[in-house]
Image: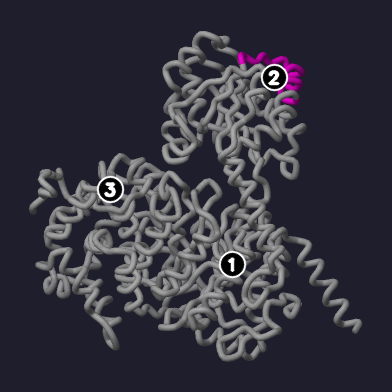
Amino acid sequence: MKLTAAVRGRHYQFRDLKEVMAKANEEKSGDRLAGLSAEDAAERVAAKMVLAELRLSDIRESSLLPAETDEVSRIIESDLDEEMYARIKNWTVAELREQLLQMEGGGGSNSLIRVGQGLTSEMIAACAKLMSNLDLIQAASRMEVVTTCNYSMGQRGVIAGRAQPNHPADHLHGIRASLYEALAYGIGDAVIGINPVIDTADSVYNILSMTKDVMTRWEVPTQNCVLAHITTQLRAIRMGAPADMVFQSLAGTELGNKAFGITAALLDEADEVIRQEGTSTGPNRWYFETGQGSELSSEAHHGIDQLTLEARCYGLARHYKPFMVNTVVGFIGPEYLYDSKQVIRAGLEDHFMGKLHGLPMGVDVCYTNHMKVDQNDMDNLAVLLAAAGVNFLIGVPMADDCMLNYQSTSYHDIATLRETLGLRPAPAFERWLEGMELMKNGRLTARAGDPKIFV
Amino acid sequence: MNDISSEVETWNELKSTTGARIDVGRAGTRPLTSNMLRLRLDHAAAIDAVYSEVPRELIEEMGLLSVNTLASDKVQYLKRPDLGRRFTTTSADAIQASCLHAPQVQIVVSDGLSAAAIEANLKEVYSSLLDSLNSLGLEAGTPIYVERGRVGSMDHIGDILQPEVLVLLIGERPGLLSASSMSAYMCYKPCIGKLDSDRNVISNIHESGTPPAEAGARIASMLKAMLDQRRSGTELVF
């Protein structure tokens, strides 16, 4: 494995694959905080040049985090499609990038995902490090990932929205009012998903029951979920709460997951419970969230850069065949992603990497108020992701989440992306909107946007 | 007609239970101008809270010893939380030289992520805290102001001054609902190496959360509990 490069008369020698991977990243404040980033722009390119020439087999053989000591590594390793890997293992990372970019059309969407099955998360991360933003958009746009919980989403030309009607005190009327607003704008086809303040089984039970009531009463073709800790959700489900999916945040290392209070064994248990006792038809019954930087924030990063760790989250996620995976790209703060340039880059990277893992990727296009980002930047990233074929975005009233205290995309924004780019809601949901006379020929009607119609 | 008006009344009841920005209307698929500008204004207040400074006059008037962390400006402070947890040598020396050692209660103030929170709440919280400490018979040491501090800076002060308990009044990450919310982090015998789980916090101190005038009493009684039980964090019974 060659770890040296001569660039403009300067000789670069890298210690190991971990260092090459970290220094090949585009600038991120989190890699700098971890002390892993390139010293300057030239060293960054030198690392990219070294990485470009490595073979996929080099990456597999020099494990960044041994499977003996980390269960996420074990899952990634054991889920690898060995037959596909054997066909491509002699490709360099440069060749992988070029192969992906020249696959196109018709069955092309499947061929990229087929290649992805023979790639470890580290290989997928390596490829993303060599890709420009437009590379990431184009390659992702050719990967169609359709999943089904109660209803299907992810079809080409579809952009769905999560209705996120959070309330700072979990007030059921308040959540319902905000949910009506979402439905009136045609949002909620991905999921009706609430982040609770009160992490108790009773509270989760009540929210799940209320959202299910609304779905039943108005025959809304979607799925519900409450994003409490997984053990709380399981207690609520065992009490008989109507949950279509289970939710969990993931980290890319076993230690990081421990900080979230989870293990693979717990995920296996939840998988069994939702299969047996959940209210959805399936087969996809998981909602996962991720986001660059979480492993560093829990000091569980093992000296690995945040992009590679994010890819490993997807390696873990794909084991459970989720209905939806959401990278909450700008929530973690400026010490990991400082400004709009870094958030936009990370959003495109995460979406591409998730799709190449075969995952139904959505993005929470978002920021906190101490980041160098504003709503205009979110407008930009949302358009880029819509062009890249993102499965869903997050819908929050006027982009302001009054419980989580951050800004995301609004019900208006998702409706606007649909109209501007000719995208549609999930098919069953669009038929429902037409029946409700809220949408006609893919456009909102005059009646749309008025939550009072549901009262 | 009766049906319609009763529906509207029900909707108004529903709507009144949330502060979410709903029933806002639209221009095509975009928000109305007034709602869009309101959002921008609230965001502007949050940004200003992060980047502004606590006025020097306030620090002097309150008689706080002003010290600096290793974060040399706001940008560095935001990117490197680790630097906001430790003091420059000059500041560490100043704390050592000018402050009462081993006080029963050490009060520390920091701008954190919202200087506006300190400006809005400090005077009231501080005076109600002193009153409450006084009536509980507790003695406070020399109060300190930490510029660009993180919660972990209390541990470094703990190493230098060895207080029995310490309270850090610090500006919270601003939200759109309130850009001037303050938190009080407390720890029994703070020192470098303490974890989040060793501390207790009273958050959301602002006019529409925990009112500043009440916060002082709540902080003092929590400090008293720490002194009585000789512990803090998840172990504290409160």
Which tag, 1 or 3, sits closer to the chain's start? 3
> How packed is label 2: few (under 14 Cα within 10 Å), some, or many (20 or more)?
few
Q: Is residue B61 left or right of residue A287?
A: right
Number of the front mark, 2 or 3: 2
Question: Which quadrant of the structure image shows residue A374?
Answer: bottom right
Residue at label 1?
Answer: A410
What coloring was used for the rendering?
one colour
Q: Nearer the viewer, residue A23 or A276?
A: A23
Q: Residue A242: image x %, image y %?
A: 58, 72
Look at the numbered disc 1 and give the secondary structure of its residue.
loop
Residue positioned 70% across, 25% down in the render: B126
- Can residue A240 be seen by looking at this rendering? no
Give the percent coordinates (x, y) of residue A241.
59, 69
Q: Is residue A325 visible?
A: yes
On the picture, is A127 further left or further right than A391? Answer: left
Q: Chain of mark 3?
A: A
Which residue occupies the foreground of this view, A339 or A438? A339
Q: Where, quadrant-wise, is the C terminus of chain A in this rendering?
A: bottom right
Q: Which residues are magenta?
A: B128-142
> Which image quarter: residue A156?
bottom left
Q: Label 3's element? A: loop
**Residue B130 magenta:** yes
| Chain letter, disc 1 residue | A
| Cα distance in 3D space between marks 1 and 2 | 44 Å
In the image, farthest residue toward the front: A8
The residue that disc 3 covers is A304
Q: Is residue A306 magenta?
A: no
Residue at 61% x, 71% y: name it: A412
Looking at the rendered image, the disc whose residue lies closer to the viewer, 1 or 3, is 1
Amino acid tagged 3: Ile
Q: Position of residue A417 (x, y in %)?
A: 52, 75
Task: Check disc 2 and report the residue beneath it.
Answer: B61
